[in-house]
Each structure stands twice: as structure tokens, then as C-alpha cells.
Image (cartoon, rainbow, N blue to C red):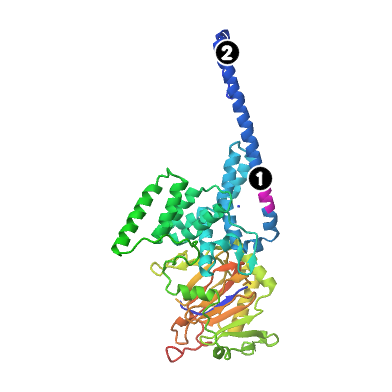
């Protein structure tokens, strides 16, 4: 069934037995003396290990106690910063497991029991990887360098959400393991910079240089790959791969220079930054346009177009429910006509809808064009839920309000969908035919073919037709949800179908009418 129009609401000693004759031999007894000494030393080692373990556990508890006091005071505000969201994924998937292993050295039944219960809802390795990729997605879309991310410096926000050397190293490994050498270089370079700056880390300099040199080679920068590999050899002379890699890189470079009749130039001494290497192309042809619009660049709003945009009070063609309190309507775009309605949802309604949706949120799906089945996709990163009128009277009121405002029949429309875009959440350019809250940065809905960007405002609704009156799709309405940079974006969508509108929106006589 074809969708007619999109209605978008933004609203974790041993012992042994001996025989008596042993005591008759001094030599044997002296052996026992030495044995006892070893046992005493073993006992001291055990005590030292217990004290070390207890000190480590206390350190963990103090750190996490301070951290949870901050995070629980405003959970949604805390998670609004993407670095905090990534580090939460990492802590619950990796670091709490390390603590569990530490405690298991002398098992604690209470701790293990709690871990077993809560592990069922812990993020796994896939979730940690997804959070890392979300940071990379934000980095690309909003052109943020790794230094800015590592220091928590995001547009309009500076928070104490820092990435350590090991965090940056793990980010780089995520890219490397996905053959994404572009991001591997950026994050391994940042890890190396912070390590050289004196930060402590589990990851060694040799480990970082190993990943970085090979990733730089994969990006085609042989001189720099050779220079980094030489540093690796100097750092760890016996490294099992470094010597072979160095000879291989030098042989390739010599061959290339010989074929091009050029002399070898020294490697660039400039640091590797965002823009040093070109990001590889991907499946999305309008990637650059889409991302520029997300940054507020390349907008095609000019004075002539702006002069055709108006605001008005809309009573739904004298709808009785809107006569005394007409809806505030603002034009967002002239052609195709995109409008925004203000104060569609109250704060109380928004919170109720979020409350209803939260326990039902699941990874949003798309329909596979080949199989026709619903599946998850990397280009749609959000969680969504579907709400029916039987769930709560607020859904009845919202559906009626949509019908009053649009003048369209909603009995044949889809259920009210509620989507939450968290760290790096996005939906790449797509068509709707065959979307509730403010965010602090990012999260716009953009139309690449139009050069338009619609920014989220809490409680408002954006409305446009996807089909012409003839039933043909309006391809200009291809749109995308930009990644949320800072904040948590809640959106409620109502897709209204073509069927049921025969008398409310009669068919046009031409294809594009």
C-alpha cells in the first residue's frame, strides 16, 4: 500500500600427611625448613594479592560511585553526550567483565549472583562496536577531529567526557577489524598522541604503532608507513612483523619511484588530522550533500524562496475542534510544500508517549527490497515502537488531532510509530512512499535533492505529501534523519496511506498534479 503523506512529531594449603621417619633425618628436616619458608612466602604473596585485589576493587567502587552519582542525577542528559553513551557501552561490555574476573579470583557469591542476573540486559560486543561506529559516524558527518572527541569538545558543549589512550586504541581497532583503515588511522594517531603526552595505558606504544603503520599503508601513504614502522622497530627491535613489513614497504616504494622516475621524498612531518586522507566513497551517492546539510551547509533557502513562506492559523477547514483553538502553521518549504505545526503535543503528552514506548523499543527495521522481509540495516540506526489507540487515551487524541489538522482519513493509516535516536542515531536518505523532542546538536531532517534542512523542535509536527494527486511518487521528498550529535531525539511518525483519501484528496488529472 502506498503511503500518501508523512506526519512527523518531534516530540551495565593444601596439606599432607607424613611418616615419622622423616623427622629422623636432619637433611630431610632442613628440606622442610626451606619448604616452610616457601610456604610463608607463598602466604605473603597470597596476602599481597588479596590486598592488591581489594585495593583495585575499592578503586573501581570509588570511581564508579562518583560516576553513577553524576549519571543518575540526569540519565537522559548524561547520555545526551555521545562519548558518555559510548563509554557506558564499553564499561558494561568490557570493564565490568574485567571486574568480574578480578572478584572471581576469590569468588563472591553475592556479586556473581547479581552479575548473572543483570548480564541478561548488558550490552554485548556488538553493542560496543556499534557505539564506536556511531562516534565515527558523528565524526564524519559533523567534521570533528579525534582530538575534539577525545577531549569532549563538541559544538556548543564542553563536558568532562574524555577518551583515554585505551579508548582511542579500541576505537582504532574497531575500524581496523572492519577494514575501515581511514578511521583506524585517525584513532590510532590520537592514541599515540595521548600516549606520547604522558598518559598511562594498557595498550603499548608498539601495539599502537603496529596498527597505525599498517593502516597508513592501506591508505596509500608509503613514506609515512615506512617512518612509523621504523619507529616500531626502534621501540621493539624483536617485533615479529615490523622488520618484514618495513622491508616490504621499502621495496614497494622503491618500485613505484623507479616506475615514475622520481626521487624518494621524506615522509610528511605534519600530524595526521581529519582531512589528511580522503574518506573512501560508500554506497550513498549523495553522502557529501547529505552530510553538508546536516551541518547546516549548502542550504538552498534564498530570499526569493523565503518570501513565499508564511505562517498562519489553521482551523482544518472550520473543523469544530480547531475553531476555538486553531493550529499554528508555518511554511518550511515552498515546493514541495512542507509545513510545521506548533504546539501539537503538550509536554505531558510527550512524556506519556515516551513512557508507553520505552518498554517496547526495538531496533528499527526496513523492508528488504529483494525479499520483502523486515530487517535491520546500518543506514537506519534507531529504536522504535508502535502504539495503538487501545494502549492509552493519549494515542486516541493524537490520532484525532492528526486527522483534524491534515483533513485526511487516519483509519487506514499505520499505527503511531515512536522512534528514539540516541548516540549517532540516523536514517540515511530514503523515500517514504512503497517521522518528538529538542536535541542540543544534530538530528535534522534533510532533503538532499531540495537542499533543505528541517530542525527538530519539541512538540511540533512536520507534514508533507510523498505522492502527487495522481498517485505517482514525488521523488523530491527523498529525505534523511541526520545523526544526533548531542541529545536524545524522540520522533513520532504517522504514515497516512493513499487508500481512504478518495474523497478527501481526489486524484489529479496529470502525473505531477
Kind of element beneath mark 1: helix
Residue in view at x 60 percent, y 46 percent: 115
Residue in view at x 61 percent, y 35 percent: 49
Q: Which residue is mark 1?
A: 59
Q: Please state if 140 lies on the left or on the right of 328 as rendered.
A: left
Q: Is residue 310 above or below residue 20?
A: below
Who is closer to the viewer here, 38 or 11?
Answer: 38
The number of discs equals: 2
Q: Is residue 20 above or below residue 233?
A: above
Report how far apart the C-alphas of labels 1 and 2 lie in the structure: 44 Å
Q: Is residue 183 above or below residue 47?
A: below
Q: Residue 180: which quarter of the image?
A: bottom left
Is the stretch drawn in magenta largely helix, strand or loop? Answer: helix
Counting from the top left corner in percent of width and height, residue 498 is at: 49, 81
Q: Which residue is mark 2?
A: 29
Counting from the top left corner in percent of width and height, residue 30 is at: 57, 14
Who is closer to the viewer here, 305 or 359?
Answer: 305
Counting from the top left corner in percent of width and height, residue 277 is at: 44, 65
Mark 2, Cα crowd under 10 Å, few <14 / some 14-19 / many 20+, is: few
Kind of element beneath mark 2: helix
Mark 1 or mark 2: whose residue is earlier in sequence? 2
Q: Is residue 63 highlighted in magenta?
A: yes
Question: Which residue sits furthest front?
Answer: 263
Q: Residue 438: which quarter of the image?
A: bottom right
Mark 1, Cα crowd under 10 Å, few <14 / some 14-19 / many 20+, is: few
Amino acid at each position: 500500500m502506498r503511503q500518501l503523506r508523512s506526519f512527523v512529531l518531534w516530540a551495565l594449603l593444601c596439606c599432607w600427611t607424613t611418616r615419622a621417619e622423616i623427622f629422623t633425618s636432619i637433611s630431610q628436616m632442613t628440606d622442610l625448613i626451606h619448604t616452610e619458608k616457601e610456604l610463608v612466602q607463598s602466604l605473603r604473596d597470597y596476602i599481597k594479592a588479596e590486598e592488591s585485589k581489594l585495593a583495585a576493587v575499592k578503586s573501581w567502587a570509588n570511581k564508579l560511585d562518583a560516576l553513577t552519582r553524576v549519571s543518575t542525577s540526569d540519565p537522559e542528559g548524561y547520555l545526551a553526550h555521545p562519548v558518555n553513551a559510548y563509554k557506558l557501552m564499553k564499561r558494561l561490555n568490557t570493564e565490568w567483565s574485567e571486574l568480574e574476573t578480578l572478584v572471581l579470583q576469590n569468588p563472591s557469591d553475592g556479586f556473581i549472583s547479581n552479575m548473572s542476573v543483570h548480564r541478561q540486559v548488558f550490552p554485548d560486543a556488538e553493542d560496543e562496536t556499534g557505539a564506536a561506529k556511531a562516534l565515527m559516524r558523528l565524526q564524519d558527518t559533523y567534521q570533528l577531529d579525534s582530538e575534539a572527541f577525545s577531549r569532549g569538545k563538541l559544538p556548543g558543549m564542553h563536558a568532562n567526557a574524555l577518551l583515554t589512550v585505551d579508548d582511542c586504541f579500541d576505537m582504532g581497532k574497531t575500524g581496523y577489524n572492519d577494514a575501515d583503515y581511514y578511521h583506524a588511522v585517525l584513532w590510532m594517531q590520537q592514541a599515540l598522541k595521548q600516549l606520547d603526552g604522558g598518559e598511562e595505558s594498557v595498550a603499548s606504544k608498539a601495539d599502537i604503532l603496529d596498527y597505525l603503520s599498517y593502516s597508513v599503508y592501506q591508505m596509500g601513504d608509503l613514506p609515512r608507513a615506512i617512518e612509523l614502522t621504523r619507529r616500531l622497530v626502534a621501540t621493539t627491535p624483536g617485533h615479529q612483523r615490523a622488520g618484514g613489513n618495513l622491508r616490504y614497504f621499502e621495496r614497494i616504494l622503491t618500485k613505484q619511484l623507479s616506475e615514475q622516475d622520481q626521487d624518494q621524498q621524506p615522509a610528511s612531518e605534519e600530524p595526521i588530522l581529519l582531512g589528511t586522507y580522503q574518506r573512501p566513497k560508500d554506497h550513498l551517492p549523495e553522502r557529501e550533500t547529505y552530510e553538508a546539510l546536516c551541518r547546516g551547509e549548502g542550504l538552498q533557502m534564498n530570499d526569493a524562496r523565503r518570501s513565499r513562506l508564511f505562517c498562519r492559523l489553521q482551523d482544518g477547514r472550520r473543523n469544530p475542534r480547531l475553531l476555538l483553538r486553531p493550529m499554528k502553521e508555518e511554511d518550511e518549504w515552498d515546493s514541495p510544500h512542507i509545513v510545521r505545526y506548533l504546539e501539537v503535543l503538550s509536554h505531558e503528552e510527550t512524556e506519556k508517549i515516551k513512557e508507553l514506548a520505552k518498554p517496547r523499543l526495538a531496533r528499527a527495521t526496513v523492508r528488504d527490497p529483494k525479499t520483502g522481509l523486515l530487517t535491520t540495516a546500518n543506514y537506519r540506526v534507531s529504536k522504535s515502537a508502535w502504539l495503538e489507540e487501545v494502549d492509552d487515551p493519549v494515542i486516541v487524541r493524537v490520532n484525532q488531532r492528526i486527522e483534524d489538522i491534515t483533513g485526511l482519513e487516519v483509519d487506514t493509516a499505520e499505527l503511531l510509530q515512536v522512534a528514539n535516536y540516541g548516540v549517532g542515531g540516523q536514517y540515511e536518505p530514503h523515500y517514504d512512499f512503497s517521522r518528538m523532542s529538542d536535541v542540543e546538536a544534530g538530528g535534522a531532517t534533510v532533503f538532499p535533492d531540495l537542499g533543505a534542512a528541517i530542525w527538530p523542535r519539541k512538540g511540533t509536527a512536520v507534514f508533507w505529501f510523498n505522492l502527487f494527486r495522481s498517485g505517482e511518487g514525488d521523488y523530491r521528498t527523498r529525505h534523511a534523519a541526520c545523526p544526533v550529535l548531542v541529545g536524545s531525539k524522540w520522533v513520532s511518525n504517522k504514515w497516512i496511506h493513499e487508500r481512504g483519501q478518495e474523497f478527501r484528496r481526489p486524484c489529479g488529472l496529470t502525473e505531477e498534479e
